[in-house]
Image: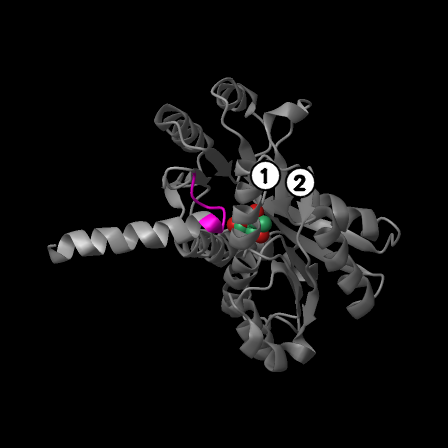
Amino acid sequence: MNPIRILAIAAAVAGAALGAAGQDQPGGKKVRVGFAQIGAESDWRKANTESIKSEAAARGVDLKFSDAQQKQENQIKAIRAFVAQGVDVIAFSPVVETGWEPVLKECKRAGIPVILTDRAVDTQDPSLYVTFIGADFVEEGRRAANWVVKAVGSSANIAELQGTPGSAPAIDRKKGFEEVIKAHPGLKITKSQSGEFTRAKGKEVMESFLKSPEGKQINVLFAHNDDMALGAIQAIEEAGLKPGVDIKIVSIDAVRAAFEAMIAGKLNCTVECNPLLGPQLFDAVEAVMAKKELPRRIVTKESVFEQSGAAATIKDRKY
Ligand code: GYE
């Protein structure tokens, strides 16, 4: 037998073994999953993509991955292409909450189950997706505000860098933050604008905040993600101020670069949002393929990290 054929047989045997783990269909066909990612706008997103790709590879899933460069229309096109290819399961992280019903109905008509990861969609029709796996963004916003109350007190002029307009994390983090500060009339959001979840835009918007008439009074920054906080830190330094001291900063995600900024004394607190959703996603794919019931909502577990513990914690961070 020629060596290539032996290799092919070995691969088929390995495939059959994977089948026992539930990832292969009868007949040795790999499970085909289409994933429509938002883009690569932040360190969080890059860690999320890596988690999904590496978990698919580890489980022998045939993953069709598409990057929408933060555009809903590109995500819709990718989902339509997955439907045309007849994949077994479609999963995606919706860049914004609204506008998904038509394409989700196309998936339903084609009989392809949909799993939402990371961000939710706004729909009244529960039959359009099987489950939503992701964080509780409202709670993350509350946690950020609770840190402000604890560390700064009940009086501050707060600048807010919002995430992508219309996205679940931007809407919900703002909601949770405002819910907590409402109880403290001295805590005021004096500037608020989107920094699109990117470092570059976070820096640009913070520069304009600092130049505005209210700029000198800002003493707290709440950024909806770490990348925007890191961009803002640069803007604050360029304006001759000390980030973390003159302006206290709390952000969300808890990526490695945020820990480095905390160790350098420039960021005060980061609220964790776990991007490592690959294992949970493919557990859900396996359950769907086995026709098992799944909970409608799978919430990821997260915590809060402050400057004081950053040096001790950074070595355990996986992203
Ligand atoms: O916080 C941000 C990313 O949807 C939770 O998207 C995610 C957010 C995350 O770009 O960094």
Query: Which quadrant of the view contains residue 287?
Result: top right
Expressed as whole percent of the image width and height from the top left, the position of residue 269 reads 67, 68
Q: Is mark 1 within 8 Å of ligand 1?
A: yes
Residue 94 makes an appearance in the image: no
Expressed as whole percent of the image width and height from the top left, the position of residue 27 reads 37, 37
Q: Main secondary structure of the magenta part?
A: loop
Query: Which quadrant of the view contains residue 251?
Result: bottom right
Amino acid type assigned to the residue bearing label 1 in the image:
Ser
Q: Is residue 22 above or below residue 220?
A: above
* Residue at 57 percent of width and 72 percent of height: 259
Q: Is residue 226 above or below residue 246?
A: above
On the picture, is 27 further left or further right than 163? Answer: left
Q: Which residues are magenta?
A: 20-25
Disc 1 from disc 2: Cα separation:
6 Å
Q: Residues within 10 Å of mark 1 (few under 14, many from 20)?
A: some
Q: Which residue is under mark 2?
A: 171
Q: Which residue is under mark 1?
A: 167
**Colouring chosen for the image of the structure:** one colour
**Magenta includes 23?**
yes
Amino acid type assigned to the residue bearing label 2 in the image:
Ile
Residues 317 and 311: in front is 317
Q: Is label 1 in contact with label 2 (beta carbons under 8 Å)?
A: yes
Q: How many marks?
A: 2
**Magenta includes 127?**
no
